[in-house]
Amino acid sequence: MTTQSRPPLPPFTEDTAKQKVRMAEDGWNGRNPDKVVLAYSEDTQWRNRNEFPVGRKQAHAFLTKKWATEHEYRLIKELWAFTDNRIAVRFAYEWHDDSGQYYRSYGNENWEFDEQGLMQKRYASINDLAIKESERKFLWPLGRRPDTHPSLSELGL
C-alpha cells in the first residue's frame, strides 16, 4: 500500500470521473514515463494489446518503448461510464512510425482505482487504422490538448 494520494478519489461522481479522465489524457500527452507512472499503484496490472506489464517498473519500460516508436503522439480520451472505483473510457490517438506512416489508434480502457486514487488495473483494447497524413484530426502542438479542441464525439470519432 502506498501513502501517495492522487485526487480525485473514489467513489467517483460524473464530474470527478471526467476530471480523472482528463488528467490521464494530459499525462499521456506529456509523454513522460517518469511522471505518468506516478498515477499508477506500485503493483498496477495492465493489459495493452499483447503486453501485460505488472508494477510501475514494467509500466515505465512499456511507456518508454511506446513513445520511442509512436512519434507525434496525440491522444483524446472520453468518459464512457463510471461507478464507485471504476471508470471506462473510449479513446483515439494519432501517431506515425519510423517510416512516416500515420495511424489512428482506437480503443477502450477499463480502469480500477485504489482508495488513494491510484490506478491499480488498466485493461486496454486497441485497434490501429493506417491513415494518410492529410486525414489527421489531432493537430494541436505536442503536449496537452487545448480545451477548445473538439472531443471524440464532436469529431465524429
Image: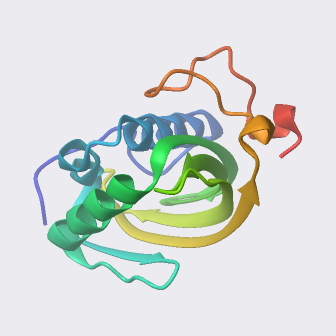
Image spot of residue 135 (x, y percent): 80, 40
| Observer-nearest of 88 and 28 | 28
Q: Which residue is depicted at the point 38% across and 45% down?
A: 9
Furthest residue in direction top, as rendered = 148
Q: Nearer the viewer, residue 91 or 138?
A: 138
Is residue 42 something one can see in this rendering? no
For the N terminus, the quadrant is bottom left
Q: Is residue 63 above or below residue 142?
A: below
Q: Is residue 142 left or right of residue 40?
A: right
Tell which of 122 and 61 is nearer to you.
61
Is 56 left, or right, of 135 in this rendering?
left
- The percent coordinates of residue 124 (x first, y second) are 55, 70
What is the quadrant of residue 59 in the picture? Answer: bottom left
* The one of 133 and 81 positioned closer to us in this rendering: 133
> Residue shown at 48%/85% (left/top)?
50
* Residue 35 visible in the picture: yes
Image: 102 above or below 8: below
Where residue 151 appears, as percent x and y from the top left, is 74, 32
Query: Residue 7: x percent and y percent?
Result: 34, 38
